[in-house]
Image (cartoon, rainbow, N blue to C red):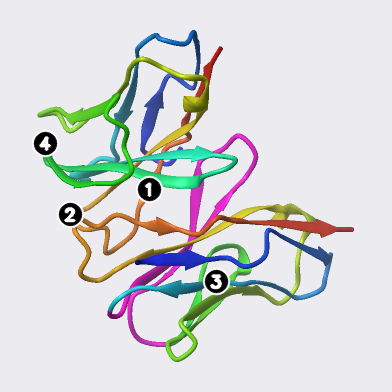
Amino acid sequence: AQSVAQPEDQVNVAEGNPLTVKCTYSVSGNPYLFWYVQYPNRGLQFLLKYITGDNLVKGSYGFEAEFNKSQTSFHLKKPSALVSDSALYFCAVRPLYNQGGKLIFGQGTELSVKP
Amino acid sequence: DSGVTQTPKHLITATGQRVTLRCSPRSGDLSVYWYQQSLDQGLQFLIQYYNGEERAKGNILERFSAQQFPDLHSELNLSSLELGDSALYFCASSEQGGLYGYTFGSGTRLTVV
């Protein structure tokens, strides 16, 4: 079965420290990978995506993610966290050959950045 | 403003009732996706339409149905509502296959009392 796992329900980081939000996936073939962020009472906002090419992808608000095919992972990173980064983060995959084009989401990781 | 418009933003209704949620996709996008977000189930894919035709179906209950109209807006109909249907319902749109990204609306929060 195709799935996405975000093993941490919550990640706590001090402001200014680097942050990592983990994501692993299980799909057939090479997927397209996405990260979205959700602020309270808001919709999902696109952060970045990996389609092909360089394994390190840079996105919005200083975030980046590294695609690791052998570990089937796509961890989200930021060198220096801000309090305003506190939100719910979702990893998602679009299997290359799936029907339609739907995204499969992980359960989400709550990021809390303390001053 | 993401370009995807969902109405209404909030909806409170009683068990057994029927509601309709509306979504207007971003200009130029032909695909519309519906997702349900609840605390215990996370983000669950319900159904996708592409240019008026159903393209993929997920864990959508038989009490739920959707359609996409010629002007590309979509409606999600929820009937015989139960308390457990209370959730955030998101609509997203994309070009044909979502290869270049998906744009989400701000959602409709449904509360069944």
Badge 2 and badge 3 both on one subunit: no
Question: Image point 71% across, 77% down: which residue?
Answer: A79
Q: Chain of mark 1?
A: B
Residue B83 pos. (x, y %): 52, 20
Question: Image point 51% across, 26% down: which residue?
Answer: B84
The circle on residue B52 is 4
Q: Secondary structure at mark 3?
A: loop
Question: Is residue A29 placed above or below B81 in the rendered structure?
Answer: below
Badge 4 and badge 2 both on one subunit: yes
**What is the C-alpha distance between the residues marked 1 and 4?**
18 Å
Quarter residue B78 falls in: top left
Q: Chain of mark 4?
A: B
**What is the C-alpha distance between the residues marked 2 and 1?**
13 Å
Q: Disc 1 residue type?
A: Thr
- The residue that label 2 is drawn on is B96
Which range of residues does the magenta coloring cover? A29-54
**First reached walking from the N terminus: tag 4 or tag 2:** 4
Quarter residue A111 falls in: bottom right
Q: Nearer the viewer, residue B60 or B91?
A: B60
Q: Nearer the viewer, residue B55 or A51?
A: B55
- The residue that label 1 is drawn on is B103
Q: Secondary structure at mark 1?
A: strand
Badge 1 and badge 3 both on one subunit: no
The circle on residue A23 is 3
Examine the structure image and report whether residue A52 is included in the region drawn in magenta.
yes
